[in-house]
Amino acid sequence: MQQGRRKDRPGRWEAFAAAVCFFGGILAALVGSLLTAATWALGADLHPGLRAVGTILLVITIPLLIFAGYCLDWMERKVKSHSTKKFEGK
């Protein structure tokens, strides 16, 4: 009986995944921007790996933020379906 209730109830994994992706996306954007700026100041020839890591972090920012939004929508859908089932008497 407890498993059925647990399946209907909105979980904490969606909130955790959304928070990790959101803060990870923001952190990736900041660190990527700093690394890219550092390659401009130091010269890309001296540190080609630094430039690559900065670019990768800047590119990863967009999918992380999109996935965070998806997790928030998924969590909201579960909350709405849980509240309608409660009012329907199920």
Image (cartoon, grey):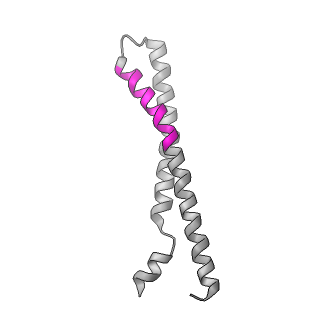
Count the labels in the image.
0
- Residue 3 vs 30, above or below: the answer is below
Residue 52 highlighted magenta (yes or no) = yes
Secondary structure character of the magenta stretch overall: helix
- Please tell me which residue is depicted at 47% across the width and 66% down the height of the picture: 12
Residue 55 highlighted magenta (yes or no) = yes
- Residue 84 vs 64, above or below: the answer is below
Q: Is residue 70 left or right of residue 39?
A: right
- Please tell me which residue is depicted at 45% across the width and 76% down the height of the picture: 7
**As rendered, which of 54 and 89 lies closer to the eye?**
89
Percent position of residue 73, x then y: 57, 59
Percent position of residue 47, x then y: 36, 16
Percent position of residue 56, x then y: 42, 30
On the rendered image, what quadrant is the N terminus found in?
bottom left
- Residue 55 vs 86, above or below: the answer is above
- Please tell me which residue is depicted at 46% across the width and 55% down the height of the picture: 17
On the rendered image, what quadrant is the C terminus found in?
bottom right
- Residue 30 vs 4, above or below: the answer is above
The range drawn in magenta is 49-63
